[in-house]
Image (spheres, grey):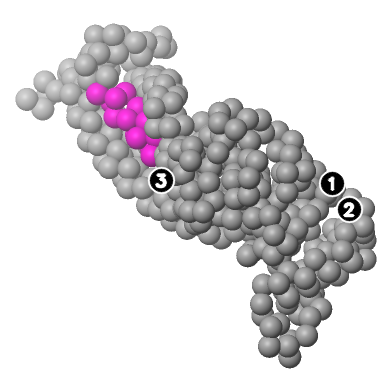
Amino acid sequence: MSQKISAFYYIKNNKRRVSVLVTSLAMFFIITYISMFLLSTTSETFKSVLVENGKYIQYIVFGADGLEFDRSNPKADSEDIYMEAVNKKYGEIENSLKQCKGIGDAFIAQVEYTYVASIVGNYYVEIPMTDKEHMEILLKHMGAGLEEGRMPDKAEEVVMDRKLMKNYGYKLGDGLSQNKDVKIVGIIDCDYYFGCGLSGGSSTFLNPMLCVITDGTVRNLESAIKKQGIVLEGSTFVDLEKGEKDLQDDIISVISSSTNIIFNGILLIITLLVIIVSISYMRDRRSEWCLYASIGYSRKTIYFSILRELLFTFITAFLIAAAITMVLMKVLDVLLITELGLGCTYFIPEILTKILCAYTALFGILQIPARMEIYKIKTIDAIDDDM
């Protein structure tokens, strides 16, 4: 008999048992993806801080060895002497620096800091403090517009984007976490974790850095300025390349071990559950398959009907789980992630690939009990002989 056995006969008449298997497989997808989605908010948030910000605003901290001041002078370590040396060095390289490819502007700024806290860990964000002219340049460069409050018009006032405000729980009028004297007077609409403000108004900065505005093409700032003949020995460069390295070393590498442990733990539990359910599912059907064999169906035909049933179950579980996961991610994004001022991404290719590989492995593992049951099939005549 060559006629195929429809996979839908059993599925239609045994919805409860099939639904248990579908639910087990779907829960594996949902729990795994949602867990990784929540953990990914850490890397996505800090990627915005370290990489996206670093594409457009970079910093140079002049090394003391490259600055010209008399170290034997008892006042050499004073803020005024140091700031004078910083301004002199900047004056020497200003014209050449602005001619470098990818650099739009550069100026001395006092840099304040605030923190962005994720589900796992936190990281600092630079808040450049400068004069009104350069503050407006920064805001325009980052595509930021005032949303609430007012723009800074006094020294030590800043504006910050809404994500930073939500993340730390800031309110208008609050001082920065790292310097309470710096007050938040406005909220800006910006695609980045960004804030800026007016400096103290004196020629002396407590934390002077060279703020460099770039067009997104400068990865290694030191190399970029060397092409224009600018060499700053001993200086520290906070650029896109450093941001990418810090993201990989400080964030991704640290949380990857946690994600692997979580994924493998969920996979182990679900695999055991699916195998137990599947073995029970197949044992209960032995008499059905014996009946098929008795009326002329071959073991091969019966086996392929089992494969089609399993394939339908896996595909159904995948589609249902994908739909539920999308809804859950949207709900979590609106109710939790956005309210915490965090970043996220819905599509995580490496996790989706792992889940598909796990599904493939489970599908292969389930062939073992299927084949074992197939070899145990007997026709009615053979059963009667045994009796």
Residue 235 visible? The answer is no
Q: Where residue 301 sits: x, y (%)?
A: 38, 19
Q: Are marks 1 and 2 in contact (CB under 8 Å)?
A: yes
Considering every residue shown, the one lying at the far bottom of the view is 72
Q: Secondary structure at mark 1?
A: strand
Closer to viewer: mark 3 or mark 2: 2
Closer to viewer: mark 1 or mark 3: 1
Specify the amino acid type for callout 1: Gly
Q: Residue at x 83, y 49 (%)?
A: 105
Which disc, if any, is residue 119? 3
Residue annotated with mark 2:
98
- In the visual, does 140 lie left or right of 290? right
Q: Secondary structure at mark 3?
A: loop
Q: Which residues make up the magenta segment?
A: 20-35
Bin the neighbour count of mark 1 within 10 Å (Cα to Cα): few under 14, some 14-19, many 20 and up.
Answer: some
Residue 375 is a magenta residue: no
Q: Nearer the viewer, residue 359 or 211?
A: 211
Q: Residue at x 18, y 24 (%)?
A: 284
Residue annotated with mark 1:
104
Q: Using the numbered discs, state the Cα–Cα distance from disc 3 to disc 2 in whole angstroms.
A: 40 Å
Q: Using the numbered discs, state the Cα–Cα distance from disc 1 to disc 2 in whole angstroms.
A: 6 Å
- Whether 64 is drawn above or below 148: the answer is below
Residue 21 is a magenta residue: yes
Q: Earlier in the sequence, mark 1 or mark 2?
A: 2
Specify the amino acid type for callout 2: Lys
Specify the amino acid type for callout 3: Ile
Give the overall secondary structure of the magenta segment. helix
Looking at the rendered image, the quarter that the N terminus falls into is top left
**Which of the 4 image quarters holds residue 14?**
top left
